[in-house]
Amino acid sequence: MRKKLLLGNWKMNKTPSEAKAFAEGCGEMVGYAISHGIDVGVAPTYVCLQTVVEHAPKGLIISAQNVSQYDHGAYTGEISIPMLKEIGVSWVILGHSERRTYDGETSEKCNAKIKALLDNGMTPVYCCGESLETFEKGETKKWVAEQIRVGLEGLTPEQAGKVVIAYEPIWAIGTGKNATKEIAEDTIGFIRRTLREMFGFVADDIRILYGGSVKPNNIAEYMEEPDIDGALVGGASLALDSYQGLIAGLVK
Ligand code: 13P
């Protein structure tokens, strides 16, 4: 039985004091989610991670938005796995379309990072998803299969079982045009079948999230679908009341 998961991707939002206010204010809702068997988390920027770790209620998952595949060295601007581990952060989002678009993140690079995270007992949240052009050409599955095959290449089934996947069609991110639950399920079911071909039955234990304009008023729809295990949420995860609405939608 896969546990539902809500992960808020804060992207480049919130100063440390704003992040602290969120962490201090979310205790009750996080407790409510956990008591209903739901995993909940947030992914702040690097400068806010420690603040959130220090002020977050017990059980809140705290994720970074990227990490280097190298442990240390001459990589200006990068943050390493040992740095995250030392402050108590063990989840990392990788391959978000914004990083693929603006920072040249590739599936090959994500593969190296995923392996490094798993070697350190950490949890990668690996993102995939197609552009509007690819969607309109009807090539979504081909595109996403390539991202999954390259990103997870060389993992053992046991390792693959520890990865979380997020399917985020680029045309749905921040646009208010969320994919219908049928479209999301069609691709996410396909991702699960691809994972089954690659890793066998462990695919049935891998959590796959939908992301792209998920809001308190539409999150429950996705949960009706058999292969969708939760959501990776941007804009609607920033304010406490909206985050609470997302949790309420998941509990339904
Ligand atoms: P929005 O929820 O703002 O569309 O962002 C989705 C996303 O990119 C989460 O990673």
Image (cartoon, rainbow, N blue to C red):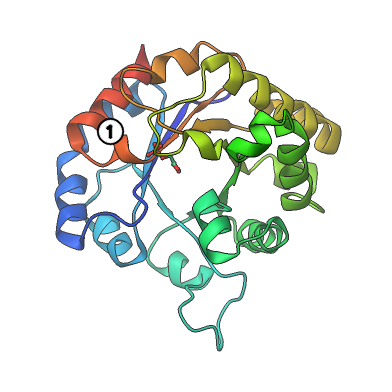
Residue 134 in view here: yes
Q: Position of residue 118 (x, y in %)?
A: 64, 56
Residue appearing at x 29%, y 19% in the figure: 248
In the displayed structure image, the side of residue 134 where residue 86 appears, left or right: left
98 in relation to 195, above or below? below
In the rendered view, would you say 213 is above or below 186? below
Q: Quadrant of the N terminus?
A: top right
Q: Is residue 29 visible?
A: no
Q: Who's the residue at 72% across and 51% down the image? A: 151
State left or right for residue 237 relative to residue 185. Answer: left
Look at mark 1 in the image and give the residue it sits on. Answer: 30
User: Residue 121 sits in which quadrant?
Assistant: bottom right
Label 1 CB-ligand 1 distance < 8 A:
no
Q: Quadrant of ligand 1?
A: top left
Q: Is residue 85 left or right of residue 2?
A: left
Quadrant containing the C terminus is top left
Residue 158 horizontal side relative to residue 63, left or right: right
Q: Amino acid at mark 1?
A: Val
Residue 224 in the image: state x and y as whole percent.
51, 10
Residue shown at 51% from the left, 62% from the top: 102
Residue 110: horizontal and vertical position, in percent? 65, 58
